[in-house]
Image (cartoon, rainbow, N blue to C red):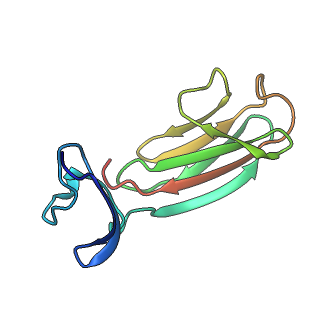
Amino acid sequence: MTDRLVLGAFDGTFVLRGSRPGFDVLDPSLLPEHLSFDSRWIEAGNIISRGEFVNPPGFNIPIANGLSNPPIVIALMSGVGPDLNTWFLITSTDTINWPANVLITDTFAQISISTAAPIGPGSRLVRYYVCRNIYG
């Protein structure tokens, strides 16, 4: 069985590094495509924009992209009120249970919120993070 995760001293630095199945994370010559994560990557955690808004009815927020690959967008919606003790992940696929979604293309990303059921009345705080995606 190969080692798949290292947290600590490695190759002269301190890292968090994980390999893909079948590849030894302790191999210093491992190619980037054989790693799932390396904290030394300059793009690791590379947030290019972030923000928050309180949704009015039928709210759409465009997120400028201008990148060579579609960005990684993480969006969270608070509970009613806004209730900051309850948070829901907004995905691009669950528009039946939550009329909120994230649309991502090569040129833009958009967060759409509706006050239709089952979200119901009341404001919701939405927080979003846009991260660079160099791997497409």
Q: Quadrant of residue 42?
A: bottom left
Above or below: residue 28 compared with residue 94 = below
Q: Decide if residue 122 is on the left or right side of residue 23.
A: right
Residue closest to the eye, 14 or 113 = 14
Q: Decide if residue 107 is on the left or right side of residue 63.
A: left
Residue at point 52%, 45% (across, down) = 109
Counting from the top left corner in percent of width and height, residue 135 is at 30, 51
Q: Decide if residue 99 is on the left or right side of residue 43.
A: right
Q: Residue furthest left?
A: 29
Residue at point 37%, 64% (across, down) = 43
Residue closest to the eye, 134 or 35 = 35
Q: Quadrant of residue 32?
A: bottom left
Residue at point 44%, 47% (across, down) = 107
Above or below: residue 43 compared with residue 102 = below
Q: Residue furthest bottom?
A: 12
Residue closest to the eye, 4 or 1 = 1
Above or below: residue 15 compared with residue 127 = below
Q: Residue furthest front?
A: 1
Q: Quadrant of residue 132?
A: bottom left
Q: Decide if residue 22 is on the left or right side of residue 90.
A: left
The count of marks equals 0
Counting from the top left corner in percent of width and height, residue 72 is at 46, 49
Counting from the top left corner in percent of width and height, residue 60 is at 67, 41
Counting from the top left corner in percent of width and height, residue 93 is at 53, 27
Quarter of the image with the N terminus in it: top left
Residue at point 55%, 47% (across, down) = 74
